[in-house]
Image (spheres, grey):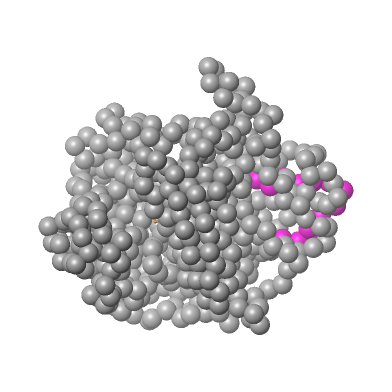
């Protein structure tokens, strides 16, 4: 094992990732930022210089656990949306090999891209009337997209279709070879379908876990998820092919993201001779659910889940109104972050800095109609947190419902900090606590850190509360989290040693004791 040092400088810079010039956040001049490569057991040291001048920075090492593909991103306000993101790749120690073979590997991050600044977005989201961010202008593949500048009015001067920064991303492959492609999504809003024209993909990894391989033509990927797929360059080698990302789960106006799958030695900048594939219908839930259900732990790499849980928490996902403001809520509570960090507040027993009463363990499932807008849309805000018994087994059921307007239930990717969880099952409609747990997958559930809940459906997951700390569990849609769609779990904080003095100073956590 090694210690690997990285020196990062984070700043705002003007860039044109989709030909339209705006401020983006870069790491050492790049967005996505540098890929962190490591071997299992290595220690990574990142020395970060915050050159944002008027803003703080917090980086979240998303999912990091064991060998696999992970992400990192800003976790302060809406900073992630500005491009402060990147990938982490952890390889196996020498002598250990992956349960599949390939000739070479590549990686890409998928994002959605807005021209409006995050300051304007945040202001709109916190206003009456509500100013929704709407659909993004572009989809980026490894930080590159292409906005149609001719659609702009007075801002046309900021858009330059011939700027080399927005030439399509090119992935060059050698005919006949097989590639491992690591794909991560850090979209702010959108669920995506990803495909490479004419090529099947074999899914082998999800969120760092080996998957029992299955073949797809297009891969559905939600914000916060990572996958590895194997692709064989086995099509006619005399031309290039399209790489396409497409919005699903929302009736979006955003054009598809395009990149070039370049068969060596064809010219890498030559557009494929075909019309890019149109991809799946945005509102067809069935193939998305089918992919979720096909994602199971690989034979020989199964970590069986505990057969019983000690506690079940049901989290109803709703859109609500609080004093006329639109918010997202869980069991009718919309989350607000207190000024004092929870970790310090719990450890030092600063009871006054957040609401000490526990948040609801469920909702009134007998009377609540998940298929219609809430009869009483009012919710409350709270800073309260779930206290989990250390080392207990916890089941979480994410229950989707109708949003504020009729016939609208959104897809939410839920991400847990500090743990992997087993995905026990998915279902349609209202979760039945008597019948549905009998259908849980106790044999080969996948371990993930991000999981989707489909419209009007539920998703059940299980984890061991064995990592002392305070952990966020939230919708990975940046704007949903911003509007309160998250909860916090606390477990075993008393087991932690003295907290580093450098983390003191915020809110009422004035000085280290
Ligand atoms: Cu990648 Cu708290 O999220
Ligand atoms: Cu959401």
Q: Quadrant of the N terminus?
A: bottom right
Q: Residue furthest top?
A: 154
The residue sitting at 19% across, 47% down in the picture is 380
The residue sitting at 57% across, 46% down in the picture is 30
Q: Position of residue 395 (x, y in %)?
A: 33, 70
Q: Position of residue 243 (x, y in %)?
A: 68, 47
Residue interval drawn in magenta: 231-247
The residue sitting at 31% across, 40% down in the picture is 404
Q: Quadrant of residue 314?
A: bottom left
Of residues 471 and 286, the one drawn nearer to the viewer in this rendering = 471
Is residue 229 in sight in this rendering? yes
Residue 236 is one of the magenta-drawn residues: yes
Q: Is residue 109 left or right of residue 506?
A: right
Up-down relation of residue 92 to residue 45 (above or below): below
Q: Quadrant of the C terminus?
A: bottom left
Q: Is residue 331 left or right of residue 59?
A: left
The residue sitting at 76% across, 46% down in the picture is 241
Of residues 439 and 81, the one drawn nearer to the viewer in this rendering = 81
Q: Residue furthest left?
A: 352
Residue 464 is one of the magenta-drawn residues: no
Is residue 287 in sight in this rendering? no
Q: Position of residue 463 (x, y in %)?
A: 37, 72
């Amino acid at each position: 094992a090694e210690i690997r040092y990285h020196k990062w400088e984070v700043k705002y810079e003007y860039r044109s990732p989709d030909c339209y010039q705006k401020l983006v956040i870069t790491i050492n001049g790049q967005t996505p930022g540098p890929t962190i490569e490591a071997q299992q057991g290595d220690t990574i040291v990142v020395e970060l210089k915050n050159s944002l001048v008027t803003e703080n920075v917090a980086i979240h090492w998303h999912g990091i656990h064991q060998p696999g593909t992970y992400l990192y991103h800003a976790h302060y306000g809406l900073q992630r949306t500005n491009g402060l993101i990147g990938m982490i790749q952890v390889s196996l120690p020498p002598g250990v090999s992956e349960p599949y073979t390939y000739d070479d590997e590549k990686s890409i991050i998928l994002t959605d891209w807005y021209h409006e600044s995050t300051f304007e977005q945040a202001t709109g989201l916190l206003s009456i009337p509500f100013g929704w961010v709407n659909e993004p202008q572009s989809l980026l593949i490894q930080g590159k997209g292409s906005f149609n500048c001719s659609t702009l009015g007075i801002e046309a001067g900021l858009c330059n279709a011939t700027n080399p920064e927005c030439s399509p991303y090119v992935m060059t492959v050698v005919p006949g070879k097989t590639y491992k492609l690591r794909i991560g999504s850090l979209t702010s809003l959108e669920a995506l379908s990803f495909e490479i024209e004419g090529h099947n993909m074999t899914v082998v990894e999800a969120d760092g876990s080996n998957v029992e391989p299955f073949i797809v033509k297009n891969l559905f990927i939600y914000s916060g998820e990572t996958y590895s797929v194997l692709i064989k360059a086995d099509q006619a080698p005399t031309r290039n092919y399209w790489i396409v990302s497409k919005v699903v789960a929302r009736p979006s106006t955003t054009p598809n993201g395009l990149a070039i799958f370049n068969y060596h030695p064809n010219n890498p900048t030559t557009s494929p001779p075909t019309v890019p594939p149109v991809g799946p219908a945005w509102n067809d839930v069935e193939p998305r659910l089918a992919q979720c259900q096909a994602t199971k732990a690989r034979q020989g790499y199964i970590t069986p889940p505990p057969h019983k849980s000690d506690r079940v928490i049901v989290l109803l996902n709703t859109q609500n109104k609080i004093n006329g403001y639109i918010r997202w809520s869980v069991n009718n509570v919309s989350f607000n972050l207190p000024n004092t960090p929870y970790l310090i507040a719990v450890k030092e027993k600063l009871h006054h800095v957040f609401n000490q009463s526990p948040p609801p363990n469920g909702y009134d499932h007998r009377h609540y109609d998940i298929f219609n807008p809430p009869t009483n849309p009012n919710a409350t805000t709270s800073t309260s947190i779930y206290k989990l018994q250390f080392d207990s087994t916890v089941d979480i059921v994410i229950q989707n419902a109708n949003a504020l307007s009729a016939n609208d239930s959104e897809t939410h990717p839920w991400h847990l900090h500090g743990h992997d969880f087993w995905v026990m099952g998915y279902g349609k409609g209202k979760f039945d606590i008597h019948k549905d747990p009998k259908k849980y997958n106790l044999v080969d559930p996948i371990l993930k850190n991000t999981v989707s809940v489909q419209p009007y459906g539920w998703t059940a997951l299980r984890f061991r509360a064995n990592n002392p700390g305070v952990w966020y569990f939230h919708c990975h849609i940046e704007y949903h989290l911003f509007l309160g769609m998250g909860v916090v779990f606390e477990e075993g904080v008393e087991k932690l040693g003295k907290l580093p003095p450098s983390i003191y100073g915020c809110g009422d956590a004035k000085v280290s004791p």
